[in-house]
Amino acid sequence: MLFETQVEVRANKILGAEIFLLTLHAPDIARAALPGQFVMLQASPSPEPLLRRPMSFCQIGPSGSPATGPETFRILYQVAGSGTRLMTRLVPGDTLSCLGPLGRGFPLLPGGHPRRVVLVAGGIGLAPFPFMAERLRGSGIAWTLLYGARSAGQIVGVDWFRQLGGDPVLVTEDGSVGEKGFVTAPLARMVEEDRDGIEVYACGPDPMLRAVARVCREGGVPCRLSLEAVMPCGFGVCLGCGVEANRPEGGYLRICTDGPVFAGEEIRF
């Protein structure tokens, strides 16, 4: 079910290098949300900027903060332009226009699923995975997080996954924390060691997703990719978020409605 409503800011906390966690009170949206889906969120209480921004659900419901509750959801965002810069000024009590939940999220696997799910996050692509990891744990499905970023200052939220019983594998390009290099290196090792026992869910920048898709394809491992795009509308009308489809007849898929989560073989990189 889709809702268009005013949501109330409950908290807006800085976590790292221009990375924030925004808590919003919106009971209908929070109850309807699924991992991998997103909302179209107004960036400020004023009419400008005109277009709303697409934001993934990061967490749903209670957390350690007294400002949150079971009717809230949280958004992890990084300053990338004027809209997200305005979002950093949000304070408790502000209200924003919000449309959601939108899009096709990650598949919800049945309990006792035989495969282990490997969550591969690049930078702010971590956003949908706290919600997903919580659902996987609730279904009794084993999971591992591979989390890559440029440097230690861009690594946030690791304790969320440890509290869920995970031991995240960290990778930074400069080696300031965890393994030095790219997150696809430990992924390739996992595929080599257990290609029949894992499937991969990934979210991050396009070059990382392209590399993840290649590693999984070569290793015969199923993967799901959550794509990012500028979305003027978020529900398939403007056709502004097309991605080339990997099919004989060609054409394009809309990230907002056909995705944002796609099977790796659906996309032509």
Image (cartoon, helix red, strand yellow):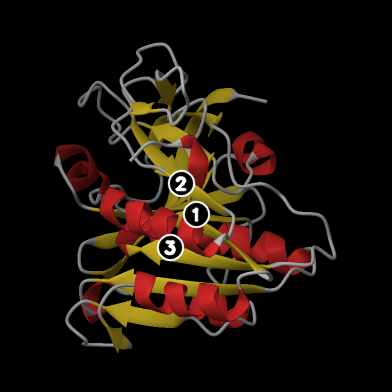
Q: How far is disc 2 from disc 3 in space, using C-alphas? A: 16 Å
Q: Quadrant of the C terminus?
A: top left
Q: Which mark is residue 9?
A: none
Q: What's under tag 1, amino acid-wise?
A: Pro
* Pointer 2 local density, CA inside 10 Å: few below 14, some 14–19, many at least 20: many
Kindly state the secondary structure of the residue where label 3 is placed.
helix
Q: Where is mark 1, residue-wise? A: 128
- The percent position of residue 111, horizontal first and vertical second, equals 84, 61
- The percent position of residue 178, horizontal first and vertical second, equals 33, 88
The residue positioned 60% from the left and 49% from the top of the image is 35
The residue positioned 74% from the left and 68% from the top of the image is 141
Q: Nearer the viewer, mark 1 or mark 2?
A: 2
Kindly state the secondary structure of the residue where label 1 is placed.
loop
Q: How far is disc 1 from disc 2 in space, using C-alphas? A: 9 Å
> Which of 262/256 is in front?
262
Q: What's under tag 3, amino acid-wise?
A: Val
Q: Where is mark 3, residue-wise? A: 215
> Which of 31/104 is in front?
104
Q: Where is mark 2, residue-wise? A: 226
Work out whether mark 1 precedes mark 2 in sequence or the reverse, and give the earlier one: 1
Q: Is residue 10 left or right of residue 91?
A: right
Using the rendered view, name the quadrant where residue 47 is placed: top left
Kindly state the secondary structure of the residue where label 2 is placed.
strand
Inspect this view and state whether residue 127 appears.
no
Work out whether mark 1 precedes mark 3 in sequence or the reverse, and give the earlier one: 1
Q: Is residue 108 left or right of residue 258?
A: right
